Image: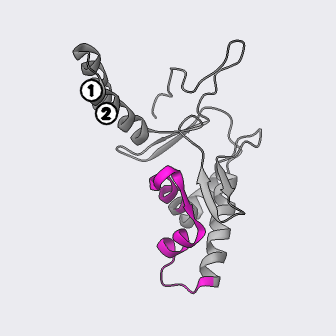
Amino acid sequence: MREPLSDGIGSFSSGEEPKLPLLQVYTFGEFAMQWRVPSAGDEDAWKSRTSARSLFLLLLCAPNRQATRSQLTGILWPETDEAKARESLRSASKVLRRVVCTVSLEGLLETRHNGDILKLADQARLWVDVDAFETLVQQASRETELRQALVLWQEARQM
């Protein structure tokens, strides 16, 4: 089991609690998800529904963690007729919503543009190791102070 992040990620104003990620996702090595808050997730549904897992992984890899319903159905069910593919996506997204939801009902999957786009939460709420790695690499590449650049490169390497 991986250790949760110990530093405060996200921003906060004075007097406010920092908004830490609700869920951490590890893709380097063995895939793992670690909740930082109590989850209302349906673990049995997650284990039994490969389409929900595939949808989650696809959205994690998509630019800005979002995609249109037609993109998703085309990738996940390319050989299926459109109506059946849309129904499969509706079912998979329903399961995924139950899985990536906290006890306080804060969800990490939302719809946008009249339901045409499915989007996962950003890095502040849904932390992903690949995104953190890319951020460290970008920061290290731009850093002009050699020591600070080395610290950032070492941090990225440890991931």
Determine whether label 1 and label 2 are within 8 Å by CB: yes
Is 33 or 118 nearer to us in this picture?
Answer: 118
Residue in view at x 59 percent, y 83 percent? 82
Q: Give the CA distance from mark 1 to mark 2.
A: 7 Å
Q: Position of residue 154 (x, y in %)?
A: 27, 24
Write down the region rendered in magenta. 55-82
Residue in view at x 77 percent, y 38 percent? 104
Q: Is residue 131 visible?
A: yes
Q: Is residue 107 left or right of residue 150?
A: right
Residue in view at x 65 percent, y 62 percent? 93
What is the quadrant of residue 134 in the picture?
A: top left
Identify the element where label 2 is drawn. helix
| Position above or below: 95 against 132 | below
Residue in view at x 30 percent, y 28 percent? 142
Outermost residue on the bottom side: it is 81
Q: Which residue is mark 1?
A: 153
Among the two numbered marks 1 and 2 on one chain, the one whose residue lies closer to the N terminus:
2
Outermost residue on the right side: it is 104
Q: Which residue is mark 2?
A: 137
Is 18 or 114 nearer to us in this picture?
Answer: 114
